[in-house]
Image: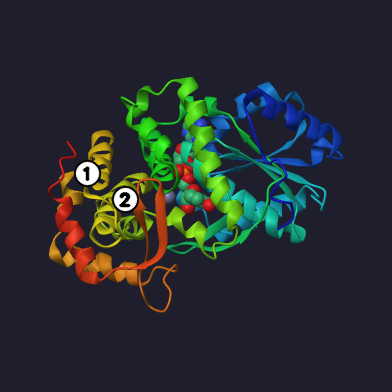
Amino acid sequence: MKKSEKDKLIFFNEKAYEILRNYLLKKVDSIKNTFILVDDKTYQYCLPVLLSHVDSLKESNLIRIKSGEKEKNIHTCIQICKILENFKANRKSLILNLGGGVVTDIGGFVASIFKRGICFVNIPTSLLGMVDASIGYKTGINLDSIKNEIGSFYIPEFLIIDPNFLKTLSNQEIISGMSEVFKHGLIADKDFWINLNNIKNIIDITDNQWDHLICRSILIKQKIVDQDPKEKGLRKILNFGHTIGHALESYFMNTDKVILHGIAVVIGMICESWISYKINGLSISDYENIKFTLSKFYSIQNKILNLSDSEIEKILVIMEYDKKNEKNKIQFSLLKEIGKCSYNCQVPHSLIRECFFELKNIDFS
Ligand SMILES: NC(=O)c1ccc[n+]([C@@H]2O[C@H](COP(=O)([O-])OP(=O)(O)OC[C@H]3O[C@@H](n4cnc5c(N)ncnc54)[C@H](O)[C@@H]3O)[C@@H](O)[C@H]2O)c1
Ligand SMILES: [Zn+2]
């Protein structure tokens, strides 16, 4: 790790733009040596906002990629490296990643490999990007259909968090990204979870509420990452809901049913809470509370919930190949109570099968 964990890294709203303006004045030799990475949507919706705050960036270089997870591959990275090379980028160049998790993952990875490492700043523009993808020093790209198989741990100069970017993000993306906010409450902060229960409707969250929710959510993740940056132990609790969630995501990727990451994680969190109740000491009332709250905010189609026996078996096989497994055992992070989570828990296959049956009894309408 390049920086001391104590260095302040994350700045919010106007203060963040002030930090960026000063950084560009003092630390960058020429604005022509600064590169902004955008995708098609953040080019349209977010770049004008950034330029309105930091006028000098109008003279910087723009690198634009297509929107979407499909772009998160080595070919895109090579294209970006070639553009950097053509513009004579050097070890003093700076990349500003303006986008969701796809842009911050790609831009962070390119920054970590180009000329063995150049500086970058993350400006996440999606909810998932703000509360999750841009936090925690992981960068990565996919290897064919294997998610985040190639990557690095690499620390940005700093992060700019501006919840105003959410105004142009689709409701679907907001609702999906919110699953990680719920997860942060469940694994590490009961009071925060209780606050989240008071929200009426995710799409009606006000600007002030967003400031608070995003800030608190980031602090929870950052505190966990700081204690275990390389995911040797504690950081694994951030995978709560993701063992089953990722398997569902991969399974549905090859069918005609599309499932967003956040929705898969919500189903994963309910299933893994039920398993936590069965074998990890989570009380029945905590389980009921989690089930009630998540099913209040998320409506999930029956065709996703009503999995056939053969579909469940295929999902189990996917789980067996999860790269986070150890000694050929499927590893879970399970709740002990709301706000406390264990990691490296092994779960019998029979219980995983049973949790999918439990799902069918939940009313997500
Ligand atoms: N590095 C990590 O630790 C980490 C953690 C979690 C997730 N991730 C990665 O993050 C990615 C998912 O991130 P995501 O959900 O942000 O996806 P994304 O970057 O694809 O963004 C979702 C969509 O919203 C658009 N968009 C982004 N900001 C917008 C805005 N303000 N207004 C309008 N449209 C906007 C994007 O163009 C895209 O179409 C995945 O690849 C995942 O693997 C990484
Ligand atoms: Zn996630």
Q: Mark 2 = which residue?
A: 269
Classify the position of the N terminus by image quarter.
bottom right
Relative side of 214 to 288, left or right: right
Asked if 207 appears above or below 89 in the picture, the reply is: above
Observer-nearest of 205 and 43? 205
Number of residue marks: 2
Q: Which residue shows up at 63% across the image and 49% down it? A: 107
Asked if 24 appears above or below 149 in the picture, the reply is: above
CB of mark 1 near ligand 2 (< 8 Å): no
Q: State the separation of the CA atoms marked 2 and 1.
A: 12 Å
Q: Mark 1 = which residue?
A: 288
Observer-nearest of 190 and 332? 190
The percent position of residue 191, horizontal first and vertical second, equals: 41, 36
User: Which amino acid type is shown beneath numbered disc 2?
Assistant: Met
The colour scheme applied to this rendered structure is: rainbow
Q: Is label 2 in contact with label 1 (beta carbons under 8 Å)? A: no
Relative side of 259 to 353, left or right: right
CB of mark 2 near ligand 2 (< 8 Å): no
Asked if 3 appears above or below 36 in the picture, the reply is: below
The percent position of residue 230, horizontal first and vertical second, equals: 59, 62
Relative side of 101 to 183, left or right: right
Judged from the image, the secondary structure of the residue bearing numbered disc 2 is: helix
Observer-nearest of 176 and 331? 331
The percent position of residue 88, horizontal first and vertical second, equals: 81, 50
